Image: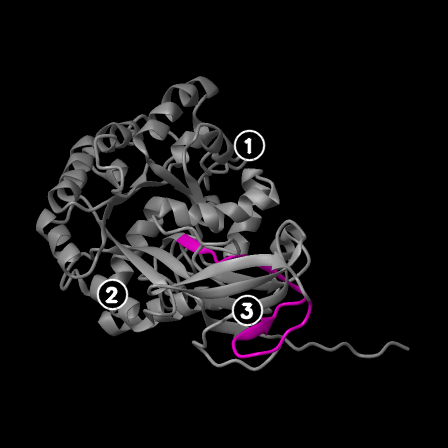
Amino acid sequence: MADFTAGQPISLLTQATLADGSVVDVEVGRQGADGIVTAVRPSAGPATGDGVLDLSGHLLLTAPAEPHAHLDKALSFDELRPEPGDLHHSIATWKAGSARFDEHSFRRRARAAALAMLRNGTTAVRTHVDVLAGADPLRGIRAVDAVRRELRGLMDIQIVALIKAYSDVELLYGALDAGADLVGGSPHSAPDPAAELERLLGVAEDRGVGADLHTDEFLHGDHHTLPGFADRVIRWPGDRMRTASHCTRLSMMTAAELDDLLPRIAASGLGVVANPITNLYIHARDVPTATPRGIAPLQRLRDAGVPVAAGADNVRDPFNPLGRSDALETAMLTVVAAHLPPHDALALVTDEARAVIGLPQAGPRRGARADLLAVRGTSVPDVIANAPADRVVIHDGNLVSRSVTDTWTAAQG
């Protein structure tokens, strides 16, 4: 592979293998300010020239989009050293621990987490950022907005203002003024879930912005907010973002209950984001046998026509001590824990994730935005299984990251 500099425009990708096994050359050009794929044709073999990149031995995919991150919390585990626990324990641990982090800490960790995602191929991130308790509650929002501005040109970042019921609504308006794009919250965890849902969606409607709510992130109980969320946003303009994240209560519903509810969700235009790694970690810790998985029923949602995506959620923080900032890890968990086929699981972290968070179509197809990930490997199951580190990341037609490994094995005998 020829030497390239960071940010260099790409004109031609040669000898790339697509997910269907075909080997192609991909031409990249500009349409106005956007880098787009202008042609995909059977490979003519090696080529040279300015902006030409040989991808022989690599699988070429749509660059992943992370539909549900928490960049403000990321990489805080080593400093906080939290004890393991359920969701309520993790929330309390973060609320107490976050008080020690100043704006610089939020910015440093958020930047490191975003760049880790980028190295692994993710070129778009929607991150929830807490409106914090105590003094200077918007310092996390400001820090992540600064990271977004710093990394503009390398990746796209959307910010959701995640506010709790105990915080004054004026702080939510302040978070939107400070750089947040969407209204967020967790109405199911409020003392009055219906009132909190009303409060959050009222602000979104007042400002004319979308909402991405942590929705019914529990396994047992009848304090559902998803039906009310769907019934409210069905009246919104068609292009206004609306997303229900987690929705783990759906995993415990009967087939009859899902038959009643899922058409309402589909009609509302809501997208649903499941987050396998975190919900597997924090849910049902007190259920030692026949343990529920706590993952929204993705296949049922897809069959009902609901847009769905899969996210990594928390990375090495009080809600999850692990995580590789790698969409292929999320795809793997979607295969083994949510029982989706590999190609479908990959779609939930690439094309379908982009659709859920409102991004234009991308990938190795004519007319699509040139946001691409090339991974050394032979097939979709191969790269999901092995998550090779050798990767080429292209954002908006420009090379933004490249990782190359070098290994050797001692001779035998």
Q: Quadrant of residue 387?
A: bottom right
The amino acid type found where label 2 is placed reads Asp
Residue linked to disc 2: 145
Q: Quadrant of residue 130?
A: bottom left
Height in image: 163 above or below 299? below
- Callout 3 secondary element: strand
Residue linked to disc 1: 290
> Spatial distance from mark 1 to mark 3, Cα to Cα?
52 Å
Disc 1 versus disc 3: nearer the observer = 3
Q: Give neighbour class at mark 1: few <14, some 14-19, many 20+ (Cα, 10 Å).
A: few
The amino acid type found where label 3 is placed reads Leu
Q: Are marks 2 and 3 in contact (CB under 8 Å)?
A: no
Residue linked to disc 3: 12
Query: Which of the image's four quarters has the C terminus?
Result: bottom right
State the residue at coordinates (50%, 70%): 11
Q: Where in the figure is residue 153, as x and y percent of width and height?
A: 35, 70
